[in-house]
Image (cartoon, grey):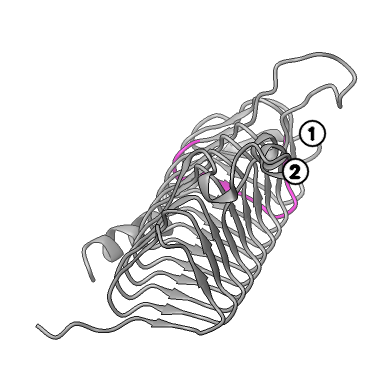
Amino acid sequence: METRRSTVDATATVSSLARIGEGCFIGPRVRIAGPANLQDLVWIDSDVTILGDVTIGESTYIGKGCVVGHPRRDDLRRILEGEIPESNIPGRTVLGKRCVVRSGSIIYSNVVVEDDVELGHNVVLREDVRVGRHTMVGTNVVIDGESEVGRGVSIQTGVYICRGSKIEDFVFLGPCCVFTNDRYLMRLETKIQGPTVKSRASIGANSTLMPGVTVGEDAAVGAQAVVTRDVQAGTIFFGVPARRRKRVPRGWRSLLEERYKKSSAGI
């Protein structure tokens, strides 16, 4: 079988520790510092920075100006003080196969992004975040550290997900909804606890989830709601504060789950 040579622009800087697969493209002014592993057919657009132990799966695209493996705050300080080189940032960052990371996005160290994930422009994934297969993350979304996002999730433009949140499979998050984790607004010492959204739940645009609340399976939260207490499975909540209004109609189903199953089956 004929091998495909990789193309590395003359202005790119690639560490001797990096491994580059077949058929890759590394664009102008790309900087790879550390033991990165680029599998076959990876496309790295111009002005991308890759730091530390990063694996990028086959046929994944990284857009212009992205950073993959950005150091967390403490590690950045150690780099600036000369304690560690930026090529040796702690933690391992993994991007799966066939992912799309659009321009301006920042992925911190110790993040796992599974196969077939798409990120919009200017997305931020902070340290210790995990994103499941076939999930779509819209433009200007921020997912703060130690948060988990399941499979087949749709996160629309401008969503903010606070540290310690958990989002299960096939969840829909409408544009500009906000997760919070500090009930006392930095006025009292308290345990930080992000919201949990269970499988197949839907959250409407501009809604706010307060610290520690759980939205149950198949539930729906209306637009601009402020959720201050748990939402029971299969119910519809809306209002300020959000209150239970009725059961989810029998004919409703999860289109995200159906699409995920078709994609996984190659249909």
In the displayed structure, would residue 136 be above or below residue 64?
above
Residue drawn 46% across the image and 36% down it = 217
Q: Of helix, strand and loop, which one carries label 2?
A: loop
Report the amino acid beneath label 1.
Pro
Q: Of helix, strand and loop, which one carries label 1?
A: loop
Q: Residue 73: x, y in percent?
A: 70, 38
- Report the quarter where the C terminus lies: bottom left
Q: Which is more N-terminal, label 1 or label 2?
A: 2
The front one of 71 and 101 is: 71
Which class describes the residues within 10 Å of circle 2: few (<14), some (14-19), or many (20+)?
many
Quarter where residue 196 is shown = top right
Residue drawn 86% across the image and 15% down it = 188
Q: Which residue is mark 1?
A: 241
Report the amino acid beneath label 2.
Ala
Q: Which mark is residue 168?
A: none
The stretch in magenta equals: 198-209
In the displayed structure, would residue 244 be above or below residue 7?
above
- Report the quarter where the N terminus lies: bottom left
Main structural element of the magenta stretch: helix, strand or loop?
Answer: loop
Dot 2 and dot 1 residues touching (CB under 8 Å): yes
Which class describes the residues within 10 Å of circle 1: few (<14), some (14-19), or many (20+)?
few
The front one of 69 and 128 is: 69
Q: Which residue is mark 2?
A: 225
